[in-house]
Amino acid sequence: MTTAAVQCEGLHKRYGPHEALRGLDLTVPEGALFGFLGPNGAGKSTTLRILSGLVRADSGSAAIFGVSAREHVGAVCRAAFLIENAIFPAQLTARRVIRRTAEYMGVDADETVLERVGMTHALNRKTGGYSHGMKQRLGLACTLLGKPDLLVLDEPQNGLDPEGLRTIRGILREEQQRGATVLVSVHRLAEVEGLCTHAALVIQGRIARQGAIDVLLGSDHPRFCLRTDDDARAADALRGAMPDVAIDNSNGALVLDGDDDRAAAAAAACIAAGLRVFEMAPVRRSLDELYRTEVGR
Amino acid sequence: MRGFGACFRAELSDLLRHPLAWLAAAATAITAIAVGLSPTTNDHNGWLVYEAALSASALAAGFFLLGIAAGSIASDRTRGTIRWIMPRPIARSGYVLGKSAAILLLAVGLLVVAAGSSYLVAAPRGFDDVTAMSSDDDEAGGGFDFVEEETIPPEFQADAMRGYAFGVTLRALPALWVLAAIGLFVSAIMRSAAGAVIAAIGCALPLQFLPELFGLSTDSARILPQRAATDAFAQLAEYGQRHAGEPWHEYTMGAGMGALALCIGLPLLAALIFQRLDLTD
């Protein structure tokens, strides 16, 4: 059985009349690079704030490596957090920020983390003069101190230039390869698809879908793509032979819902209609499609 | 209490870099010097000048301290730096009490500045027996009158005045700490730094009127702790015996204990309340 790095059960949180979380259940497996998705106001930041100990849940439980998040944050140092935009006292230099963070955490002030995020050039500059992207990089550097077992990052890409985005992607992969679990709240769906091993979609304070990316994008809704010498005729032939199958020929190729048996039957129907079949391949759903489907419900 | 030491050192380091702390020290010193050089204290004995300069400069320090303390925790929330600090392995009580300890230490520093400046400005007048005493003169609109004393009472002899001045200095410390504690308390429970400063001033002002609750005029209440402090610190047995039986003696000791209880209790209460808050900015 895989240990959960993060386990939330029935989390409820209300801010005045607004119910931010409505029984959120989240499981982040140990070692995963976990994308946390959802529209604005869905409850992502509130969940991460509860895990970080900044906000108290009204009910439900949130645990990090089996220890209540509230106790975990106050007692041990296995998790590091970057919650929303990184902000530091303006009068401190990056070097001092690293030293002070290390002191707060009770770990060595390892300045090599600044090299990893590409901040060595601004080591002795006060953070008050930093751009938003530089602060984000420094915030990320702080989370790398002490080699934590869990990194929780709330929209770390905010304000980063393309080079910064590449850097952060590289760091997240390196951390996962090191054995750390990474829980990252992201808005760019393509980024999650290419980077994360797992994902969860939050909608209106609840988890709509969660699991391994491959499972989320394929197994429950298999589809395949068919390319023939005449797609219009092929579509007509298939509608006649397989009237119950949804066929989409709007994007230059035929895309059909169905499993392997359906694919074989479709190929046979096209050949029987005198068409030449050039290509047949499974189609993976995009995360964007999954997102739009779930959010639109 | 985990994180107390780290938060204490961080706050102290920030305070030493904060222009407001240096401005507070400068304003405290300038107030002491201004009062000491003022024409109203021109002919006074050094002890009286010291007392006047210290009282005024401690008041100036108190205002700054109130503002600095009120902004300390609330500004972390207003700026968002709380999101950098609190997700670390730091107990909320460690955070509040660490900051409190640093600000209480700043109060000691400001008092040293106030006392040092007051002493320097008073020294040229000489620290001899007080041969003239001042009193409010209602008919003259509250100005100073000087009454020559043929025989100097024991409480105005130099030794007694030394104890008196020492007592006045020590008395100022819990007063400053109470102001800092009020500021910290308000700061812990409010989100806005500006709001916390305003609220702290609003909460501190009624303290001035507490003596009225005990049936004492504000003027008498002001002088009583000084005499009590003299009693406590000057080792003037005769003076102490003479005043120990006076009805206000217990009150002044009670007020001193109350001040100490407030400056310890308020940060603890703040830490307790802070445990339950959602730290959103």
Image (cartoon, grey):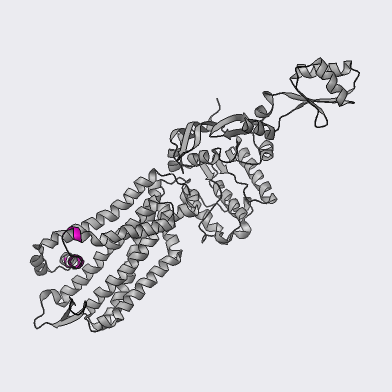
Residue positioned 29% across, 72% down in the render:
B56
Q: Is residue B230 left or right of residue A108?
A: left
> In which quadrant of the rendered view does residue B195 lie?
bottom left
The residue shown at (28%, 83%) is B39
Q: Position of residue A50 (x, y in %)?
A: 48, 39
Q: Is residue A124 in view from this perspective?
A: no
Q: Is residue B268 left or right of residue A202?
A: left
- Residue B271 lies, in percent from the top left, at 36, 48
Q: Is residue A159 left or right of residue B169?
A: right
A268 inside magenta stretch: no
Judging depth in this view, the residue of A74 and A204 nearest the camera is: A204
Q: Looking at the picture, how far across and down is residue A162, in whole percent? A: 69, 50
Q: Magenta stretch: residue B219 in it?
A: yes
Depth check: A201 or B54 in front?
Answer: A201
- Position of residue B111 in the picture relative to residue A82 (left or right): left
Magenta highlight range: B212-227
Q: Main secondary structure of the magenta part?
A: helix
Looking at the image, the residue that sits furthest to the right is A274
Q: Please determine whether, in this image, residue B103 is positioned above or below residue A116.
A: below
Whether A192 is drawn above or below B247: the answer is above
Near-viewer residue (A71 or B60) = B60
Looking at the image, can residue A133 be seen? yes
Q: Position of residue B25 (x, y in %)?
A: 38, 70
